[in-house]
Image: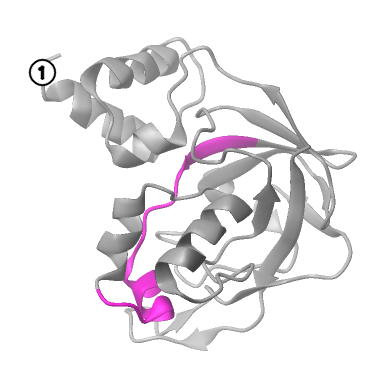
Amino acid sequence: MPLITAVCRVAALLPDSGAVGVTAIDKRPLDGPVEVKKLGVYGDVQASRKHHGGPDKAVYAFADEDAAHFTRLLGREVVPGLFGENLRTSGLDVTGAVLGERWAIGERLAVEVTMPRTPCATFARRMREPRWVKRFADEGRPGAYLRVIRAGSAADGDEVVVTSRPEHGVTIGECFAGLSPDRALLLLDLADRGGFVAEPVLDEARRASARVGV
């Protein structure tokens, strides 16, 4: 049964050498339930609003199974929150989640998968690992951003139920690796029919379709 194994939010803003001067990537697990609303976990913040946060990136989810993979790769434990995630899951294929897939969490919270996480220089500085952005990308396990469809609480131990999965089948992993033209067209068609596709994904779909002159 898929579960939430940790809910994390920023512990403190840390000094950072990037343009903003601070980073909110230092997320740590919370005890007990916490409200999750349109803009994310209650009390969480984003230092760089240009690249992080907002309704389509309200919550960042990462799988225990993928954390275990990186633990083996790095030779050190990837504890909940180390990658800046808000939710840790178990028994859920986050990389294989379909864009637009919806999850029910606990008694009320409902979220929708929007896009993969893109590793950045702040993440690299956090990890202090050589060539970290490329190494993380090469593993193809980015985690997923979620938008909140219905606010509710989340806590360690809450059940996660996949309540719907779009027929187009385009996954977080495919989007992260780079959409092929035919997969891009599926997303563009969905958007043309009024379906929700996050703007960064639409941009990628347009670029991919343009490669064959569509």
Q: Nearer the viewer, residue 99 or 70?
A: 70
Q: Residue at x 26, y 15 (%)?
A: 182
Front position in the image: 17 or 95: 95
Q: In this orientation, does residue 60 appear?
A: no
Q: Can residue 144 be seen in this view?
A: yes
* Residue underneath mark 1: 212
Is residue 116 highlighted in magenta?
yes
Left or right position of 208 against 184: left
- Residue at point 50% right, 67% down? 71
Q: Where is residue 123 in the image (x, y as percent from the top left)?
A: 40, 70
* Vertical placement of residue 140 versus 17, above or below: above
The C terminus: image quadrant:
top left
Q: Residue at x 55, y 70 (%)?
A: 78
**Which corner quadrant holds the N terminus?**
top right
Percent from the top left, x then y, of residue 154? 81, 52
Q: In the figure, is residue 103 to the left or right of 137?
A: right
Residue nearer the viewer, 207 or 5: 5
For label 1, count other residues whose C-alpha is less than 10 Å away and answer few (under 14), some (14-19) or many (20+).
few
Tell me which amino acid carries mark 1.
Val
Residue 207, position as x, y percentages in the image: 20, 31
- Report the magenta residues as a range: 112-130
Is 190 left or right of 2, judged from the image as shown?
left
